């Protein structure tokens, strides 16, 4: 289960990076926003699976979740 969720995280990160690398004038902001939300969802699912095993969630994953929450909706705490 964890390998599948990690693969989902990796794919979502790659997709977001690919969309973000485009020239600013050619970027589709709605597609980039959707990709960021997909990455956030994948990270949250992965962290939840780790927590369900009573393992500590790596700090880097928690930081990335916080960053994506800010990017997706800056009003969220």
Image (spheres, rainbow, N blue to C red):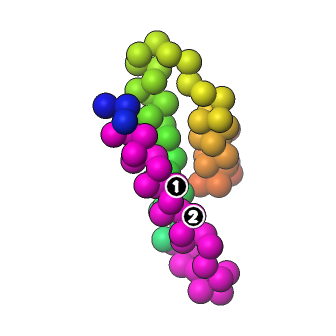
- Residue 15 inside the magenta-drawn segment: yes
**Magenta stretch: helix, strand or loop mostly:** helix
Give the number of the disc on residue 17: 2
Mark 1 packing: few (<14 Cα in 10 Å), some, or many (20+)? some
Q: Position of residue 57 (x, y in %)?
A: 56, 24
Quarter assignment of residue 72: bottom right
Residue 74, x across and y down, in percent: 68, 51
Which of the pair 52/72 is nearer the observer?
52
Give how far across and how far down residue 40 sits, in percent: 51, 47
Q: Which residue is mark 1?
A: 13
Q: How many marks?
A: 2
Q: Is residue 49 left or right of residue 47?
A: left
Secondary structure under the numbered disc 1 in the rendered image: helix
Placement of 35 over or under 68, stated as above or below: below
Q: Residues within 10 Å of mark 2 (few under 14, many from 20)?
A: some
Which residue is painted at 48% across and 71% down in the image? 31
Q: Is disc 2 in contact with disc 1, using a CB cutoff of under 8 Å?
A: yes
Seen at 60% across and 27% down, the residue is: 58
The residue lying furthest to the bottom in this view is: 25
Q: CA distance from mark 2 to mark 1?
A: 6 Å
Check if residue 42 falls in the magenta segment: no
């Amino acid at each position: 289960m964890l390998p599948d969720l990690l693969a989902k995280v990796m794919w979502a990160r790659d997709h977001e990076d690919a969309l973000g690398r485009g020239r600013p004038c050619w970027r589709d902001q709605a597609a980039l926003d959707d990709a960021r939300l997909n990455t956030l969802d994948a990270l949250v699912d992965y962290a939840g699976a780790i927590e369900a095993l009573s393992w500590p969630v790596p700090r880097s994953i928690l930081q990335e979740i916080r960053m994506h929450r800010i990017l997706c909706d800056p009003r969220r705490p």
